[in-house]
Amino acid sequence: MSDPRSIESDPSMIGGVPKAPFVRLPDPASIFARRAVRFRALAANANMAPYLEFLAGICDAQSAVLPILADPVLPLPEIMARARQFDMPPIDRGAFDPDTTVHGTCRSFFDELASKDKPEAAETALARVREYDDPSLDRVIAAVLADAIPADELGEHIFAAAALHLHFARLASRMDGSALVPVGVGMCPVCGGRPVASLIVGWYGAEGARYASCMLCATLWNEVRVKCLVCGSTKGIGYQEIEGQDGTVKAETCDECGSYVKVFHQQKNVQLEPVADDVASLALDQLLRDGAYSRAGINPYLAGY
């Protein structure tokens, strides 16, 4: 029989019930493969099937290139201690300086992607970005990290974004989850990035909890269930969806700041994946486009839409 005192003293338990963990770190070896599967499943019954299939190919390339990538240099104890001391993310995307590992990841990914089927415009953009020297590549990387993708170079920036997802997911996977702390409303505790969407999950010990999903590093972190992920308000929160749908995909709207971020009810459908389902639910964005709320979820795969 367990000692009740051990339950009471365990910070991961509340009244003998597991406490929802603050973060769930990504597993790069599986996340991109799962995303590819989801993109293809969504493409089977979607008007934008060719684009979803193209994005599945990007995920295939991300998975395929993982085994050959050089390990990033990361002074983990030092950055974790500094992050915990100052309540800041251990990876500062605002001060990110691409090194040879980042450049190598980008170029290896671009080479792998060259063999995948893609539209003619994407083929042209990939050819251009593969010719970029390091300073040109750094310019594109900086724009992606600033969530400022220019309309005249969409393809090049989308490919760079996909490469950065690889790099940052690998960095995030090496963090000490128990040492991570909240760094701000709607901000990833690993890289400080904004979420693509949030999930209502059904995991054991976290049933019904809400997790925001970082677009850049794929970290999931726990947030209050009814709260704006942009301004932090708990007032004027509403939910909109397309009439006749199954209620698993909604837009959480905020009257205080006029923004919305999608929320996916994964506890009702475990196949939901934040990045893939965000793209596939573009019709919801189009429904809200001319209304009172502006999209706040970050997804480079929807740049230009």
Image: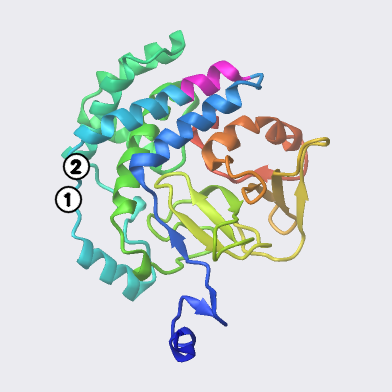
Along the line of sight, the residue nearer the viewer: 189 or 10: 10
- Count every numbered label the image shows and give the total: 2
Q: Position of residue 60 (x, y in %)?
A: 38, 26
Q: Give the residue at the far top of this rendering.
A: 120
Q: Give the residue at the far bottom of this rendering.
A: 5
Identify the element where label 2 is drawn.
loop
Q: Residue at x 38, y 16 (%)?
A: 125
Numbered badge on residue 99: 2
The amino acid at mark 2 is Asp
Few, some or many C-alpha atoms within 10 Å of disc 1 (few <14, some 14-19, many ≥20)? few
Question: Is label 1 or label 2 in front?
Answer: 1
- Residue 257's quadrant in the figure? bottom right
Q: Position of residue 178 (x, y in %)?
A: 37, 69
Left or right, 244 with respect to 174, comes to right
Which residue, given by chain and number where applicable, does mark 1 sit on? Answer: 73
Q: Are marks 1 and 2 in contact (CB under 8 Å)?
A: yes
